Amino acid sequence: MASRFSAPPARAPRLDGSLSMLYPVKGALKGQSLSLSALLMIDDNGRISEARVLPDDPVFVAAVLAALKNAIFVPAQIDGKAIPYWTVLDFKFTIDGPTGPDGKRLER
């Protein structure tokens, strides 16, 4: 994405508030942990116009995209004017072993 823009903004886009998400049930049941990065294009209104999450894992990507669905950003600025620009958000899902439907850890 950086190649699409000729100059960096005076202020990069930033998340306005916080995100909350549920640990994916399938990932919890398997005891999976994963780190992902979301490459986002933020428009001049602070909304996500493009999103790509890597690595492409269907269980965890769905959770990240659901969390980003209503995210609002303070858009990037150049000379005090809001502009479209890109940013990256990192997500880390960590669990210590598989869990049951009640969230309690299962013995292996």
Image: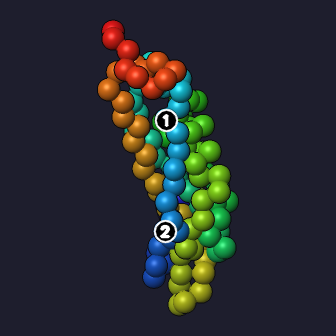
The answer to the question of whether label 2 and label 1 lie on touching residues, with beta carbons closer than 8 A, is no
Q: Position of residue 23 (x, y in %)?
A: 49, 35
In the rendered structure, which amino acid carries the disc numbered 1? Answer: Tyr
Residue shown at the point (55%, 73%) measured from the top left = 74
Nearer to us of marks 2 and 1 is: 1
Mark 2: secondary structure: strand
In the displayed structure image, the side of residue 59 where residue 98 appears, left or right: left
> Which residue is labeled 2 in the image?
14
The amino acid sitting under disc 2 is Arg
Circle on res. 52: none
Quadrant in which the N terminus is drawn:
bottom right
| Of the pair 64 and 11, the residue shown nearer to us | 64
Q: How many marks?
A: 2
x 41%, y 37%: residue: 93
Residue marked by disc 1: 23
Q: Residue at x 33, y 11 (%)?
A: 107
Could you say whether the residue bearing mark 1 is in a helix, strand or loop?
A: loop
Q: Nearer the viewer, residue 3 or 48?
A: 48
To which quarter of the image does residue 108 belong?
Answer: top left
Residue 82, image x and y in percent?
60, 81
Residue 97 shows in this picture: yes
Colour setup of the view? rainbow
